[in-house]
Image: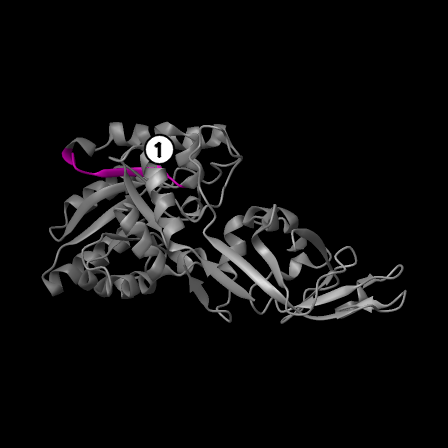
Amino acid sequence: MRVEVSLDVIENNVRKIKAWVGNSTGFTAIVKSNAYGHGSLKVADAAIRGGATHLGVSTVEEALSLREHYHDVPILVMSPFLASDAARIVRAGLTPYISNIGQIESLQVSGLSLSRRVTVHLEIDTGMGRSGCLPADYEAMLQSVQDCANIELTGIATHFSSAESDGDFTRAQLSTFQQLIRNGLYEDHANLVLHAANSAGSLLYPEARMDMIRPGLLMYGIWPCPIYEDFPTLTPAMEITARILHTHTPPEGWSVSYNRTFRTDGTKRFATIDAGYGDGYPRELSNKGYVLIHGQRAPIVGRVCMDVTVIDVTEIPHCVTGDTVTLIGENRSERIRTEDLAKWIGTTEHDITTRLTGRSPIKYQ
């Protein structure tokens, strides 16, 4: 299996998104989980060239890897961290989300011992239910930060749980967030960056863009929601292909792949391609979906194996060993998108690209 990523496409996607929401709006490029499988360092470069103002990751380890290359770019650590991580956060000049008093205390202790200030963003849980302080604790958290000489609050954030699918709940989350900001101590922090909008939030709720947006899928040309005419025109950055390794025409009633989940019902021609779940190609695609060869669709048959997958090429008699097979991307007039694979197996788009195992090194264009 081969994975190709166009960095020019990512850079241009960032430029288009920024122009669409307003170039004065901050832009956190979400590059966690190896930039959704696209390669964090290369993608960060492209996003910054396109105008990203911040980088966003999940773990301290991801942030430290980026900090080695980007000394001046603000790097947000968006998942909760442990007290044992505090010194590394302070030393590297990272900006963590904070969710509880214990995190504030650990950062203050590390800041004092290292004689450094640390910037933080306060996360409010308005309905995501996984991290952030509860609305009832918001003002106490603000006060706790104010009481720490070595901690500087530079932003306040929340995260939408269902921006792509539940408008009423998303608006309720946004309303809670905005009300807390209005009623809290925000006037003492006129330079705070307020942010809530992920990819779907950025597209569907203009009022949620505020000071900064945090696109993930959109940067990569993957859509988290139905596409409307007024949305920016974005291009998928990743293409995944394989090759035909072997073709065969078994007798009627022959079983294909593990557990005999597919049997021939007539004369069929099959091809074995070099892509499997060991590469990150979803096993759930067994007997579902299709690939593209010479602009034609070839159904997946039998179980997806660790190293190979079998496809039905009965209707493509001219394909031969060595031919290119498109798993994600464009093939003549046909295209398979990441969104298609996600729909076929009932998962999110993020799940598809983050499965890539690295067995096939990314080729950058």
Residue 205 in view of the camera: yes
Image point 47% across, 60% down: which residue?
Answer: 4
Residue sticking out furthest to the front? 318
Give the extent of the magenta segment.
188-198
Query: Would you name the residue on which mark 1 appears?
Result: 20
Magenta span includes 197: yes
Q: Is residue 25 above or below residue 246?
A: above
Q: Is residue 50 above or below residue 166?
A: below
> Label 1 crowding class (10 Å Cα cut-off): few <14, some 14-19, many 20+?
some
User: How many numbered marks have been drawn onto this rendered protein structure?
Assistant: 1
Image point 22% across, 53% down: which residue?
Answer: 73
Left or right: 318 in relation to 105: right
**x and y percentages locating residue 25 in the rendered image:** 27, 36
Q: Name the colouring of the figure.
A: one colour
326, 22: nearer the viewer: 326
Secondary structure under the numbered disc 1 in the rendered image: helix
Pick the quarter of the image with the C terminus.
bottom left
